Image (spheres, grey):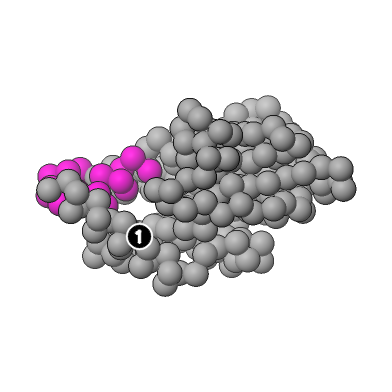
Amino acid sequence: MASNKEEVKLFGMKASPFVCRVEIALKLKGVEYKYEVEKFQNLSDTLINYNPVYKKVPVLVHNDKPIAESLVIIEYIDETWKQNPILPSDPSKRALARFWSKFIDDKWLDAIIKVSSTLDEKEIEKGIEETEVALQFLEGELKDKFFGGEEIGLVDITGVFISFWLPIVQEVIGLKLFTSEKFPKLYNWSQDFNNHPIVKEILPPRLETLLAFERSRSESLAASK
């Protein structure tokens, strides 16, 4: 755990899946931290000073050293606090975990953004197809209770987007992309992950998150007209 001499701060927003990832990693490690709440479209000067390149959350500050980008932060956490490893010790398995985490952000996330951020039917249709292909790849990759085996690992934490946020997205847009019939293993994984005591403690209230996403989507669609 973080010693008394260490200072750990997390700059974030409760509705952010990227921040949620970092919180889960910190809690899994038993690291005590101070949460600095940022406001959407009104970021603090402190946050921007810590992350002048991207100007966004999350940012982890450890003993005055800032680290940005959720997956980079998680690896930093895993390397700094050795208890309860998030990445495997085997190099090939560690590389594979990084591969699938990047796949979620590069392939699945891009696809679901297409579905949820446009009214163009062709773009929506293309996004649905890409989303389902990505989910099918993940369905085939899941061999145990979690992607990390019997314990939560990097891919599981990255996949909080799918386990918690995807059902909210599909409810708002009125589609059934992620069901137990289409993806039985992945769906069961999502239930186990969301109900893990540490994850359950971190996840934001569902209704509040749904309303926030619905409001954000409406504003985005209105601005694009």
- Circle 1 sits on which residue? 213
Residue placed furthest toward the front: 45
- What residue lies at 40% left-to-right and 35% top-to-bottom? 106
206 or 138: which is nearer to us? 206
Relative to 126, is 191 on the left or the right? Answer: right
Q: Is residue 130 magenta?
A: no
146 or 84: which is nearer to us? 84
Q: Is residue 160 visible?
A: no
223 vs 62: above or below:
below
Q: Is residue 115 magenta?
A: yes
Relative to 64, is 107 on the left or the right? Answer: left
- What residue lies at 38% left-to-right and 43% top-to-bottom? 109
Quadrant in the picture for residue 165: bottom left
- Secondary structure at numbered mark 1: helix
* Main SS of residues in magenta: helix
x and y percentages locating residue 68 in the rendered image: 57, 35
x and y percentages locating residue 101 in the rendered image: 51, 39
- Other-residue count near label 1 (Cα within 10 Å), few / some / many at <14 / 14–19 / ≥20: some
Residue placed furthest toward the right: 4
x and y percentages locating residue 158 in the rendered image: 53, 46
Q: Which residues are magenta?
A: 109-126
64 vs 7: above or below:
above
Residue placed furthest toward the bottom: 207
- What residue lies at 69% left-to-right and 32% top-to-bottom? 65
- What residue lies at 56% left-to-right and 54% top-to-bottom? 37
207 or 181: which is nearer to us? 207
x and y percentages locating residue 222 in the rendered image: 18, 53
Q: Amino acid at mark 1?
A: Phe
Relative to 103, is 158 on the left or the right? Answer: right
Q: Give the tally of numbered discs.
A: 1
Q: Is residue 94 visible?
A: yes
